[in-house]
Amino acid sequence: MRIIGVLVALLMLSGCINPVAEEGRVFTLQTLDRAEDSEATYSLKDNLSEGPVLILFIGVGCIGCKDWTDELRLSHQEWMEMEPPLQLVSIARYPSFESQEDVALEFGTPESNHYTPWPITLPSDEDPIRKYDDETKLSSTVFEYYGMPGTPTLMLIDEDGVTQWKSSTYYPDAETISEIEIQYKDMI
């Protein structure tokens, strides 16, 4: 009987406890160092100061990644003209297996099979995730923090560095593009 009373009290009090807000996380990663990348390194924090960022984890051998890149390229310019812009960044997911040259050949130039007109980053397996507020290095790597994502994985990051949406489809479709745009509108 006493256990039931304790459980009832806990249930009644549970509404009084505020959930802890998720702290934002950011990263700084090497890029292909093309004009589209703006610099030799990409700072998520710097880009978030301009607006939300849609991350696309890519792999050279990933057919869905190539299809997503081609599909997102159709919306890229329109999204960049919104206020604030919805920015894109691709993260090469398999640095142990795919070289910088492999990524550049598949995604890096207008002559590439799946040209990417937004920044492409090339993390190592050890690149750390950082606190949003002061960019202190944390013990997790970028890949660990994002849950060791497979490819393709898309994540929409708000201006505070918090993941607000994650894809669940391998191939692009109109419904998922619509979800991205709805989530973006809800964030701003």
Image (cartoon, helix red, strand yellow):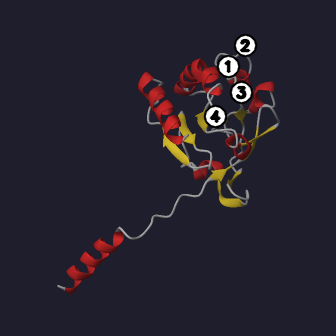
Mark 2 and mark 3 residues within 8 Å of each other at the beta carbon? no
Task: Name the amino acid, label 1.
Answer: Tyr
Report the Cα–Cα distance between label 1 and label 2: 7 Å
Please rate how many residues cluster around mark 1, counting C-alpha atoms within 10 Å: few if below 14, some from 14 to 19, many from 20.
some
Please rate how many residues cluster around mark 3, counting C-alpha atoms within 10 Å: few if below 14, some from 14 to 19, many from 20.
some
Q: What residue would you read off at disc 1?
A: 115
Q: Which residue is drawn at 64% across and 21% down?
A: 77
Which is nearer the N-term, disc 3 or disc 1?
3
Q: What residue would you read off at disc 3?
A: 102
Task: Name the amino acid, label 3.
Answer: Asp
| Residue 165, horizontal then vertical, whole percent | 49, 42
Which is nearer the N-term, disc 2 or disc 3?
3
Comparing labels 2 and 3, the label whose residue is closer to the camera: 2
Comparing labels 4 and 1, the label whose residue is closer to the camera: 4
Nearest the viewer among 172 and 94 is 172
Which is nearer the N-term, disc 4 or disc 2?
4
Mark 4 and mark 2 residues within 8 Å of each other at the beta carbon? no
Which residue in the rendered view is the most extreme toward the left?
1
Which is nearer the N-term, disc 4 or disc 3?
4
Q: Which mark is residue 111?
A: 2
| Secondary-structure class at tag 2 | loop
Mark 1 and mark 2 residues within 8 Å of each other at the beta carbon? yes
